[in-house]
Amino acid sequence: MVSPNLAGYQAYQKNKYETASPHRLILMLYNGAIQFAGKAKDAIDKKDIEKTNSFIQKTEDIIYELISSLNLKEGGELASNLNNLYLYMIDRLIEANIKKLIAPIDEVIGILEELRSAWEEIGKRGTLGS
């Protein structure tokens, strides 16, 4: 049985995602990927293979969601470059997962933070509907 407070919280969380603008949703994806990648690093430090794998897969899932949000037909070179960058990050995460290395995860986090920062700037300029 779900407590009333938990049910209310779950409804709030669902509504938060369903009512967010496309710009805000991308920011949420970047934030989630950065968060899960950080947790993957912690799991590697603790030698927790199961959690490492889980958090890296969650990070990859979010990056695949970012890939699926690209409009490669209309996005031109920018969309193509982002697609290639996302695929590169997936490759680095796979390497990190196989070899249990932190350095590739740090690299991915750095790229994600730069992309998030650029995306935030686009939102501030009103270039995209937010």
Image (tube, rainbow, N blue to C red):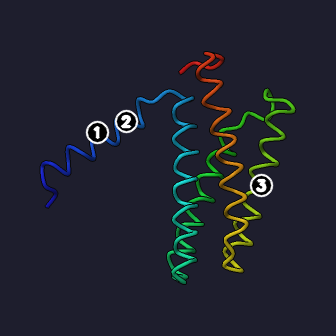
Within 10 Å of disc 2 (Cα), the crowding (few <14, some 14-19, many 20+) is few
Q: Which of 18/45 is in front? A: 45
Q: Which residue is drawn at 55% across and 74% down?
A: 52
State which quarter of the image contains the N terminus: bottom left
Q: What residue type is labelled 2?
A: Lys
Q: State left or right for residue 126 relative to residue 81.
A: left
Q: In the image, residue 73 lies at what x, y percent?
A: 81, 31
- In the depicted view, which residue is nearer to us: 86 or 114? 114
Q: Tag 1: residue type?
A: Tyr
Left or right of 87? Residue 23 is left
Q: Quadrant of residue 118?
A: top right
Label 1: state its secondary structure. helix
User: Residue 16 got which mark?
Assistant: 2
Label 2 to label 3: alpha-carbon separation: 28 Å
Tell me the SS state at disc 3. Answer: helix
State yes or no: discs 2 and 1 in contact (Cβ < 8 Å): yes
Q: How far apart are marks 2 and 1 (CA)?
A: 6 Å
The outermost residue toward the right is 77
- The residue to which callout 3 is attached is 87
Badge 1 crowding class, 10 Å Cα cut-off, few under 14, some 14 to 19, many 20 or more, is few
State the image quarter where residue 14 is shown: top left
Q: Is residue 112 above or below residue 1?
A: above
Q: Residue at x 71, y 49 (%)?
A: 111
Q: Indicate the position of residue 33 as horizontal and vertical percent values.
A: 57, 53
First in sequence: mark 2 vs mark 3:
2
Label 2 secondary element: helix
Residue shown at 71% from the left, 80% from the top: 99
Q: Is residue 98 above or below residue 82?
A: below
Instruction: Give the quarter of the image for residue 88.
Output: bottom right
Q: What residue is shown at x 79% (from left), y 26% (from top)? A: 74
* Mark number, residue 12: 1
